[in-house]
Image (cartoon, rainbow, N blue to C red):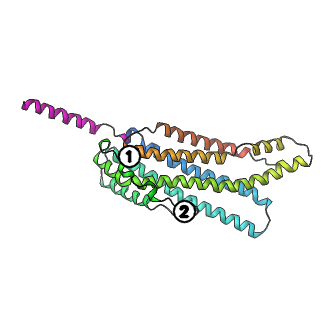
Amino acid sequence: MRQSISRFAVCVALVLTAACAGKTPLQVDGLATTGKQYTTTLKKVNSFALDHTLEFTADLLPNLPRDHATLLVHTQAMQQRAALLQTTSEYFDTQALYFAELSALAKGDTSTGTTRALRKLVEALNKAPDVGGIPRVSKEAVAGLAGHVASWKHSAQVREELQRSAEPVAHALLLNQHILQEQIQWITQREELARQVEYREKVLKPFVEDKKLGETWKNAWMKHTKQVPTIELLEQAKAASIDMQQAWVNVLRGEGSFEHLQGVFDQLNSNIQTANKREPNTHDPK
């Protein structure tokens, strides 16, 4: 009888050892890879939106009153916008570091350096930047997420870290969504004004003045008719950001796969690259 119990204990020990040596759900899901993709994509979206807004404003300025006040107002507005996006870019970097450190912990790095870094990063995420013009996200909106951490799915160290960081990370992801929404609203207003001026000068005036309408007019009319790619890309990024929030809940539960989301970020990055290549040809130098 004792021999049977002894054999059983050895078998249990072997099973537990194998389980500990195997991949954790966080590793399987590719958390670090997806987190890096996510934050890198948001930074590219930030840069894309700023570059295009600068271009819209530069196109618009020659058609506004040519005085110092006009130039000063628009220049200061764009400088403030650039500063705001730099702040959010640094916030995205903090999130990327968090995902990388959490991945290290999930792989078994329980060193003091890793745990200390995670604590500092969570503190930084808990103190979300006060970005003007963007609504602050109420912490109550993500309260209770620590209860989603599945004890039987994670090691003790990972479980402890997830319980501590569940709500700060969710809060940061939700704020990212609001940042993107505010960008959509901000750039839509300015882009619409620039498009109205461009339509008046390049489409309407040549048409009603009965000038010979060649390729220049045709391209201007087609461009005005098409959906604006800037807003479309921002909407895609916002949808991906919402998906990332659900992915975080899945991480807490030790469930789900990141493959689909990684594909979404790959496609979004490809779309940004394509739009950047296409943009120089959309403005007629004449």
Q: How many marks?
A: 2
> Mark number for residue 131?
2
- Judge depth for marks 2 and 1 and give the one in front: 1
x 61%, y 48%: residue: 234
Residue type at numbered disc 2: Val
Residue 135 on image: x %, y %: 55, 60
| Majority secondary structure in the magenta region | helix
Q: What residue occupies the far bottom of the structure in this picture?
A: 69
Residue type at numbered disc 1: Leu
Question: Helix, strand or loop at disc 2?
Answer: loop
x 69%, y 46%: residue: 228
Q: Which residue is mark 1?
A: 252
Vertical placement of residue 165 versus 225, above or below: below
Q: Is residue 76 magenta?
A: no
> Mark number for residue 240?
none
Residue 257 on image: x %, y %: 43, 37
The answer to whether residue 98 is left or right of residue 19 is right
Give the mark nearest the N terminus, 2 or 1: 2
Mark 2 and mark 1 in contact? Answer it, CB < 8 Å.
no
Numbered range of the magenta stretch:
1-25
